[in-house]
Amino acid sequence: MLGHMARTLVVKVTAGADAPERCAQAFTVAATAVAAGVDVSLWLTGESTWFALPGRAQQFDLPHSAPLAELLHVILTSGRVTACTQCAARREIGPDDVLPGVRIAGAAVFVEEALAEGAQALVY
């Protein structure tokens, strides 16, 4: 559907289990874009940083929403997932703790991605 577009979608999710609807919306939009062939970069910040850890997405449950673990799998398979450096450090999460395919990077990388030619950034 959207695979012909040469744009990148950068999605920053700032909520986790503390605001489940906002969190699920971000993951749903990112996974839908990946499924449509869009280049997607999902940023986990704030409480969503916990989903960089193995097993955490499986614990998330929101009625009438796709399972977060499945959405994350789709994004990891064809997109990029980044945990915020400071957010990870505040939660004592290091590079050896995160799921395979998740990187830890900071604001400079987010700004570079968000301001790249053809990029669209969304913050949830």
Image (spheres, helix red, strand yellow):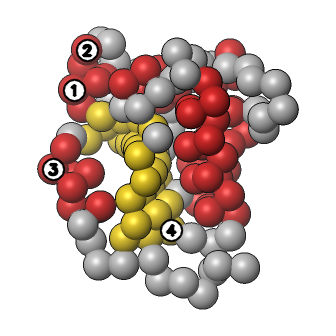
Q: Residues within 10 Å of mark 2 (few under 14, many from 20)?
A: few
The numbered disc on residue 90 is 2
Identity, as a three-letter code, of the amino acid under mark 3: Ala
Identify the residue position indicated by label 3 in the image: 108
Q: Is residue 67 left or right of residue 115?
A: right
Q: Can residue 14 be seen?
A: yes
Are the residues at dot 2 and dot 4 in contact (C-beta closer than 8 Å)?
Answer: no
Identify the residue position indicated by label 4 in the image: 39
Q: Is residue 67 left or right of residue 104?
A: right
The numbered disc on residue 13 is none
Identity, as a three-letter code, of the amino acid under mark 4: Asp
What is the spatial separation of the Cα atoms under label 2 and label 4, in whole angstroms? 29 Å
Foreground pick, 85 / 29: 29
| Secondary structure beneath label 2 | helix
Q: Position of residue 40 (x, y in %)?
A: 50, 60
Dot 1 or dot 3: first in sequence order is: 1
Are the residues at dot 1 and dot 2 in contact (C-beta closer than 8 Å)?
Answer: yes
| Secondary structure beneath label 1 | helix
x 33%, y 29%: residue: 95
Identity, as a three-letter code, of the amino acid under mark 1: Gln
Dot 2 or dot 4: first in sequence order is: 4
What is the spatial separation of the Cα atoms under label 2 and label 3, in whole angstroms? 18 Å
Are the residues at dot 1 and dot 4 in contact (C-beta closer than 8 Å)?
Answer: no
Are the residues at dot 3 and dot 4 in contact (C-beta closer than 8 Å)?
Answer: no
Identify the residue position indicated by label 1 in the image: 86
| Secondary structure beneath label 4 | strand
Q: Quadrant of residue 113?
A: bottom left
Measured along the vertical axis of the image, is residue 40 above or below residue 59? below
> How many tags in the picture?
4
x 82%, y 25%: residue: 63
